[in-house]
């Protein structure tokens, strides 16, 4: 017998009527119902095959128009409905990108809800009986926290399940379902309905709520909560039997690895921070494997790099053995732990723990130290010790800035409000600035010393009554090694604001003397002055353009000579040697002229046994020579004479 379109639709609707999962009263189509459909078909319809094709066109047009109208109404209704009551949408789920702070807040809300339900005015069975979807989930959460899997199994609807669940008990099914759901999502319990009727505007049958969806490789599997009879005339919410039937299929893809399953059965049944026994063992093995792998890799890499000629083998070895090894250890260990089937909650906590930020920070700090030490060795080899000493405080400041930036980025990814944090830091920095005023003054003093560079490490300077060599300009103080080989640490705030005399910055050392002579005649003084000038002009260690020898004053009976010249050296010990040579030559000049050196105020009355200065043959000969050559060196020698005398003396004297 040929059925009509209307009858086919009716029969299909009967066959698609609520199945075994529906509440009592929604029974499948009976035989009498099918006969009624067939009887109505005889009265109202013609066979499908007997109708020409042209008769279908008006019906198809009307059907298409009706479908378009229904679609428009559905779209309008979806736009008007709120996101909370969207058709078939599960409660809010925590995404994998959620921060740890948001996750902890979600856990806090769940704990508060559980405490309110258990301590409120309602009896304790309000939580355990599962009268509402929220009560069911809170009861499951409480049962799993207490490891009471038998109680958790009572919230699985095991009715009308004909398929073999692979020999699993309800308690095992409940535990497996919780494990698989926890791998992909964390429910926002506060979004669950606390109404015994559940969500009525979610587009699902009134006895069913969508709890979550589990993603598989071939699609998504919905997890429903369903209101079923509790056996005492009432109703309670349980995990739908249709969802329970899918647990074995989900377990094949999301369940334990065979090795993990065997370890789970062999090891004692315990958990730690939400981790199963085999996951705890896996973390321990991951830590050991990460350390061994990082150690072997850095050892091999260091041996390979050391074959390349370099000026800094110890620094490279230190970088491989410490920063690089710690970095690889953290990265490898975290990577292995992430393959242990952790729950989404644990993955979020692991990602927000900052271990990856810590690893990269250690690597960058080690690399900065490596580059700094390498450049220090290179600059020292080039003799630029002053620049080499500045690298240490500069890299110290760079490390502080790097750590601060990494900490702020981690805080932002962990869910903290950076603007609030920066505002708090701004307020706190005022208090810190007041407490660390001296420290900040020293830091600013260090920056001033780096910018102005009145002295550099290695310079000899005078600071107040302190003379020594600058060894290091640090962030807090400047270290000076005195002439007694002691170390003096001067705060930068004091050192940068005081008068500093830098001996190493001079291009020559000044030879300056005030000498008092006793002479019997002006000719004696003329000869002495001329010979001293000639000596200075002729000396190879004296700059000729700096020579100045004058009879400056007469104190009582003594003539005051002012001797001034620049010595061609910046080394003090070499200067002392040149000054010693000049002083010996000056003494000889004075003795040859018959004069004598005295202090101011000294008076010679009698010179027994000495010829009169006017009768000194040396004086007469010099005066005659100047007169004959018409070359008196007064007020000074001529430029030709100075050029001829320059460097003509033997130094050191032979």
Image (cartoon, rainbow, N blue to C red):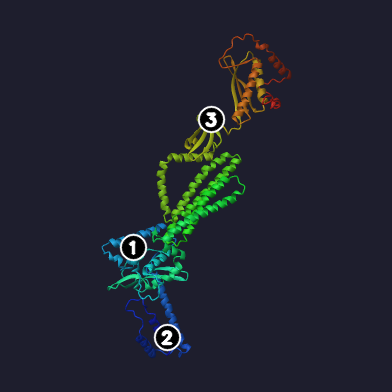
Answer yes or no: is residue 197 visible.
no
Residue highlighted by disc 2 = 5
Q: The C terminus is located in which quarter?
A: top right
Cα–Cα gap, marks 2 and 3: 114 Å
Rendering quarter of residue 511: top right
In the picture, residue 105 is in which quadrant?
A: bottom left
Pointer 2 with pointer 3, Cβ within 8 A: no
Secondary structure type for disc 2: helix
Around disc 1, counting alpha carbons within 10 Å, would you say few (fewer than 14), some (14 to 19), or many (20 or more)? some
**Which callout, 2 or 3, points to the residue nearer the camera?**
3
Q: Earlier in the sequence, mark 2 or mark 3?
A: 2
Q: Which residue is mark 3?
A: 483
State the residue position of label 1. 142
Is 524 drawn above or below residue 410 in the view shown? above
Query: Under tag 1, what secondary structure?
Result: helix
Residue 548: percent from left, percent from top: 63, 24
Mark 3 nearby-residue class (10 Å; few <14, some 14–19, many ≥20): few
Farthest residue to the front: give it.
Answer: 266
Horizontal side of residue 602 vs 336, given as left or right: right
Residue 364 horizontal/vertical position (percent): 52, 50
Crowd tier of the residue under label 2, counting other residues whose Cα lies within 10 Å: few below 14, some 14–19, many 20 or above? some
Q: Quadrant of the N terminus?
A: bottom left
Considering the numbered disc 3 on the image, is that residue within a helix, a strand or a loop? loop
């Amino acid at each position: 017998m040929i059925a009509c379109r209307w009858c086919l639709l009716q029969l299909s609707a009967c066959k698609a009527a609520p199945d075994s999962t529906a509440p009592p009263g929604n029974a499948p189509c009976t035989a009498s119902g099918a006969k009624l459909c067939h009887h109505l078909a005889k009265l109202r319809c013609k066979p499908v095959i007997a109708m020409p094709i042209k008769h279908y066109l008006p019906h198809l047009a009307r059907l298409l128009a009706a479908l378009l109208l229904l679609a428009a109404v559905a779209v309008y209704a979806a736009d008007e409905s709120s996101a909370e009551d969207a058709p078939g949408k599960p409660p809010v789920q925590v995404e994998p990108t959620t921060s740890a702070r948001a996750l902890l807040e979600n856990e806090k809300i769940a704990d508060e809800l559980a405490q309110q339900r258990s301590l409120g005015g309602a009896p304790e069975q309000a939580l355990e009986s599962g009268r509402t979807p929220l009560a069911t989930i809170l009861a499951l959460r409480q049962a799993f926290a207490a490891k009471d899997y038998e109680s958790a199994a009572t919230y699985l609807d095991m009715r009308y399940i004909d398929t073999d669940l692979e020999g699993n008990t309800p308690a095992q099914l409940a535990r497996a379902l919780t494990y698989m759901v926890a791998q992909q999502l964390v429910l926002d319990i506060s979004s669950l309905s606390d109404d015994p009727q559940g969500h009525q505007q979610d587009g699902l049958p009134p006895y069913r709520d969508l709890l979550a969806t589990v993603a598989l490789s071939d699609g998504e599997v919905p997890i429903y909560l369903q209101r079923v009879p509790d056996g005492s005339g009432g109703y309670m919410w349980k995990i739908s039997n249709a969802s329970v039937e899918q647990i074995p299929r989900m377990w094949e893809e999301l369940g334990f690895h065979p090795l993990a399953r065997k370890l789970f059965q062999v090891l004692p049944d315990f958990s730690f921070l939400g981790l199963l026994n085999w996951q705890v063992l896996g973390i321990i093995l991951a830590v050991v494997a990460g350390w061994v792998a990082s150690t072997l890799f850095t050892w091999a890499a260091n041996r390979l790099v050391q074959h390349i000629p370099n000026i800094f083998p110890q620094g490279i070895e230190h970088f491989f053995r410490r920063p690089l090894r710690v970095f690889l250890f953290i990265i490898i260990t975290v990577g292995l732990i992430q393959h242990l089937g952790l729950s989404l909650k644990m993955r979020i906590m692991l990602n927000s723990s900052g271990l990856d930020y810590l690893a990269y920070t250690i690597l960058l700090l080690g690399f900065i130290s490596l580059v700094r030490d390498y450049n220090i060795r290179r600059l020292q080899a080039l003799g630029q010790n002053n620049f080499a000493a500045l690298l240490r405080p500069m890299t110290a400041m760079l490390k502080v800035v790097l750590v601060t930036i990494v900490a702020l980025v981690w805080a932002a990814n962990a869910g903290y409000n950076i603007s609030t944090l920066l505002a708090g830091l701004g307020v706190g920095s005022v208090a810190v600035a007041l407490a660390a005023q001296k420290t900040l003054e020293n830091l600013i003093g260090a920056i001033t010393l780096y910018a102005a560079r009145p002295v550099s490490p290695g310079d000899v300077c005078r600071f107040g009554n302190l003379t020594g060599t600058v060894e290091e300009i640090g962030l807090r103080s400047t270290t000076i090694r005195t002439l007694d080989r002691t170390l003096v640490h001067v705060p930068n705030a004091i050192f940068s604001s005081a008068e500093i005399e830098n001996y190493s910055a001079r291009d020559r050392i000044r030879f300056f003397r005030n000498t008092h002579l006793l002479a019997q005649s002006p000719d004696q003084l003329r000869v002495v002055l001329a010979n001293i000038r000639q000596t200075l002009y002729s000396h190879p260690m004296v700059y000729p353009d700096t020579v100045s020898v004058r009879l400056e004053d007469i104190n009582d009976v003594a003539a005051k000579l002012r001797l001034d010249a620049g010595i061609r050296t910046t080394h003090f010990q070499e200067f002392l040697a040149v000054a010693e040579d000049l002083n010996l030559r000056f003494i000889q000049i004075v003795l040859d002229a018959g004069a004598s050196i005295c202090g101011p105020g000294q008076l010679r009355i009698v010179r027994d046994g000495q010829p009169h200065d006017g009768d000194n043959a040396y004086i007469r000969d010099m005066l005659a020579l100047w007169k004959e050559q018409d070359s008196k060196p007064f007020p000074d020698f001529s430029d030709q004479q100075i050029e001829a005398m320059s460097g003509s003396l033997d130094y050191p004297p032979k």
